[in-house]
Amino acid sequence: MELIFRILNKCIHSLDNKSENKLIKYFYAKLVMILTGGVRNNYYLKEENIGFISKARGAGRDCLNIYRIVITSEKKLFEKIYLNNSSSLKKCLKFYDDYYKLYNTFGIKIPQLLGVIKSKYATALYFEYVNEEMSSVNYFHTGYKFVMNNNIRKYDEPKFTDDYLNELYLLKPYKQLPKLKQKYGLNNLAQYANKVLKSSRLCYNHGDFNKRNVIGEYVIDWDNFDLYPEGHDLSFFLVISYKMDVISASEVFGYVDEYTAENQNAAAKECIYVLLLLNCESYIRNKEDELLMKLIGIVEKYVGGSTHKT
């Protein structure tokens, strides 16, 4: 079934903006009907209620990478289809089952999960549809409120196993470590990163805090919600905000100081510097960039004075 999803997703991406084609809409509606068990009497799946979201495409391997609006008598819903054994589905449901209400008490706006249809192979989730403007200003203001929330950081599980670390290094930006060693001569970076990450608290993070997942004041797409090193969302958020020219390099370090000031947490700050460097290598990739150069200088001192290759 996973292979079928991969083939379908390749076809879906090849459609580009042709999703308004009536024939495509018809066959996709039939596909959803089959995957979700053919629940024809459920209003979620009635074809007259379906509309594609313009240019809405995902990149996941265990869900269908095209999203639809489902129009009911009361509201619009956002539809997403997952394989039943999908890790994304499990993470998303864990968030909504165990943390959604809690996060709302922190003043974070999150779309409600309003419907779940499960069949033999796939599960369809139906969320409150959020139709607000996406902008760099919204991203920064909503993101700042989210990543700086001290209440969220208190919910952690401090066990950091070797198996977890090995899985972590398969993810972007963590898999950038070998490239950093080759490009900048940080010869002991891997050992240093192991030490730093293992000494970090594990905290629940959104996991994919990019601009597409912040709509107005809402944070959407909780498919990557999981335990990560403290500052995972923060470091990604700061690098993306810097890349969009919303904040300067000096402001990045100011927000790191603000984040770690409450508990004077030196270990967290050290971990965040490593994560910032990895995110810079992932999303900026300019060897002359001001933030990247400053981070290399900081990490070099921590690593033990490795010679920087120019």
Image (cartoon, grey):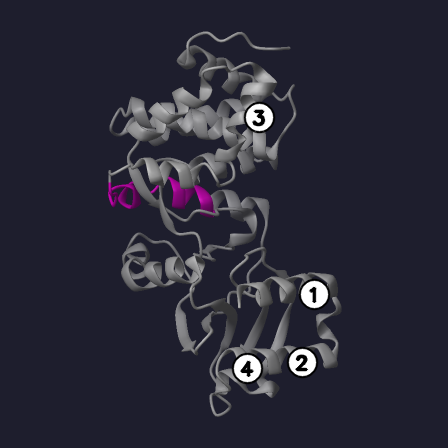
**Which residue type does callout 1 highlight?**
Cys
- The mark found on residue 27 in the picture is 2
Q: List x then y, in percent, for residue 303.
A: 42, 14
The residues tagged by marks 4 and 1 sit, at their Cα atoms, a distance apart of 17 Å
The residues tagged by marks 4 and 2 sit, at their Cα atoms, a distance apart of 11 Å
Q: Residue furthest bottom?
A: 41
Residue 133 vertical placement versus 72 (above, below): above
Q: Nearer the viewer, residue 289 or 186?
A: 186
Residue at point 55% right, 87% down? 46
**Which residue type does callout 3 highlight?**
Lys
The residues tagged by marks 4 and 3 sit, at their Cα atoms, a distance apart of 44 Å
* Chief SS of the magenta region: helix
- The residue indicated by pointer 3 is 179
Q: Nearer the viewer, residue 121 or 228?
A: 121
- The mark found on residue 214 in the picture is none
Q: List x then y, in percent, for residue 32.
A: 56, 78
Q: Which residues are magenta?
A: 142-157
Q: List x then y, in percent, for residue 214.
A: 51, 52
Residue at point 31% right, 55% down? 103
Q: Callout 3 environment at 10 Å: few (<14), some (14 to 19), or many (20+)?
A: some
Residue 104 vertical placement versus 179 (above, below): below
The residues tagged by marks 2 and 1 sit, at their Cα atoms, a distance apart of 12 Å
Residue at point 43% right, 41% down? 144
Label 4 SS: helix
Q: Earlier in the sequence, mark 2 or mark 1?
A: 1
- The residue indicated by pointer 4 is 34
Q: Earlier in the sequence, mark 1 or mark 3?
A: 1
- The residue indicated by pointer 1 is 11
